[in-house]
Amino acid sequence: MAAPSVAKVDGKHMGKQSTFHPGAAPYGNFINYYTFNPPIRRLQFIPTDMLDRILDAIKVANHDAVATVLDVGCNTGDLTIALYEHLLKGGVPEVVKQTSEHACEETSSEKPPEEGHQVDTDDSEKIKPDQCDCVTNSPETKCEGKVSGSKQLFMLACDIDQVLIQRATEANPYPDNVMFQAIDIMDSTSSNKVCANFLDAHHASHIFDLTTCFSITMWIHLHQGDSGLLTFLEQVSKRTRYLIIEPQPWKCYKSAVRRVKKLGQPMQWQSLSELQIREDVVDRIVKHLVTECNMEIVQRLGETDWERQLLFLRNSMNTV
């Protein structure tokens, strides 16, 4: 997933003036991210009735309720759309049978390749039709924006990479309910304005009901340092009632450095030696959320194939 940074992105050059290599995406903005980490790898841990449970927990009436979700670091939006359908339908999105025009490929039960590595789909074992996480955009299978009763679901998905956002927007099957926006979430002035305008436009509360942060903490940490990481956690907590976060462990940092060096690309973030939050980064993130951000752990949803925890938290100050 792509994370925020102070640098602007034009799709070819990021930060320093160097040729962009897809395997060394400096902000996690891998152009083929979902070929090696398909949405189902996260969705399998998220309860199908999560949104209804959240609305019930904050005592929203059964009529005219608006549910809002913020997805930070959405890349090309594949997981955003899959999550939208997952929450809306109360289950994994409907699948389509594999055909020559619409085939879904991923590796078998083996551990997926490391983040950022290319996948040779020609040698990959094809997934069975009933395991495929692809969705159709036909009128028969398209979601209508309702959770249950007349509850409406609206999602704002953001990423710093304008090219990825353009791709997500062009492929968006639900433009009335899902909005993709290129913003730097660490720019509090602009990001607060975008979020406020989105919530106002949908007559929602001043905060999101749910915020998701899938594999973006490392990229923020690498570019913004220890203080930037903690600031991000504080900012995202203030904006939401509930939070799903997938923090990267320290081994992912070392893998990112090795990958860039192997590709002969320049480092576009600070040295790991400058970071004080290191091997215990996941524990420090959780501790900061709990002790400084009024968050409470509701559930440890599971652990991905890359040994990353998926955590579900609630804001004790923003929930009834």
Image (cartoon, rainbow, N blue to C red):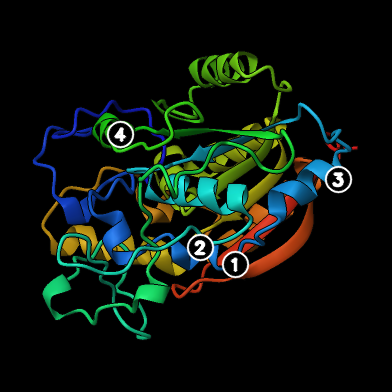
Percent from the top left, x then y, of residue 286? 69, 56
Residue drawn 18% across the image and 60% down it: 261
In the rendered structure, the answer to whether residue 215 lies left or right of residue 22 reads: right
Please tell me how many numbered marks the rendered image carries: 4
* Location of residue 13 (image quadrant): top left
Helix, strand, or loop for circle 3?
Answer: helix
Q: Are marks 2 and 4 in contact (CB under 8 Å)?
A: no
Q: Are marks 4 and 1 in contact (CB under 8 Å)?
A: no
94 vs 42, nearest the viewer: 94
Label located before the other in sequence (4 or 3) = 3
Helix, strand, or loop for circle 1?
Answer: loop
Binning the other alpha carbons within 10 Å of mark 2 as few (below 14), some (14 to 19) or many (20 upward) gives many
Q: Which residue is mark 4?
A: 161
Q: Are marks 3 and 2 in contact (CB under 8 Å)?
A: no
Percent from the top left, x then y, of residue 226? 54, 44
Spatial CA span between label 2 and label 4: 22 Å
Spatial CA span between label 4 and label 3: 35 Å
- As shown in the figure, which amino acid type bears the numbered disc 2? Arg
Label located before the other in sequence (3 or 1) = 1
- As shown in the figure, which amino acid type bears the numbered disc 4? Asp
Spatial CA span between label 1 and label 2: 6 Å
- As shown in the figure, which amino acid type bears the numbered disc 1? Phe
Residue drawn 25% across the image and 29% down it: 9
Q: Which residue is mark 1?
A: 45
Name the mark nearer the viewer: 2 or 4: 2
Q: Which residue is mark 3?
A: 57
Query: Would you place residue 187 above or below residue 171 in this image?
Result: above
In the rendered structure, the answer to whether residue 252 lies left or right of residue 304 reads: left
